[in-house]
Image: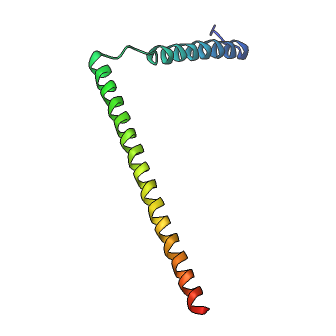
Amino acid sequence: MEPTVSLVELVGLIIVVGTAAFTIVKVARLWTSRPQSPSADVTARLEALERSVQQLQQEQTETQERLDFAERLLSQAREERRIAARDHFTDWAA
């Protein structure tokens, strides 16, 4: 006699094996993605990088302030020339 497997037994086996495989994969992913303490070298390099970024941000802020000042001066000079030209044209037309 050959052993026969019913469809219900086969589906049950697939569900059990599938659930076990899913659980194993999930646990493996959680275990490999757990945070580990960085080495002292990595920590020191990260701190140096953070200081460099802060310094660059400060320099960028100062540069932006200088640019804003220069734009205000240029705008003011344009406005003064426009007013002077309008006054000159008004005097000439009168």
Q: How many marks?
A: 0
Q: Is residue 19 left or right of residue 81?
A: right
Nearer to the camera, 7 or 57: 57
Nearer to the camera, 49 or 13: 49
From this viewpoint, which residue is outermost toward the left?
A: 41
The residue at 38%/39% (across/down) is 58
Q: Is residue 41 left or right of residue 12?
A: left
Q: How is the image coloured?
A: rainbow
Residue 23 percent across, percent down from the top left: 57, 13
The residue at 57%/87% (across/down) is 91
Position of the C terminus, as image quadrant, is bottom right
Q: Is residue 48 above or below residue 3?
A: below
The residue at 55%/15% (across/down) is 21
Nearer to the camera, 93 or 18: 93
Answer with the quarter of the image where residue 86 lies. Answer: bottom right
Residue 49 percent across, percent down from the top left: 32, 30
Q: Is residue 39 above or below residue 64?
A: above
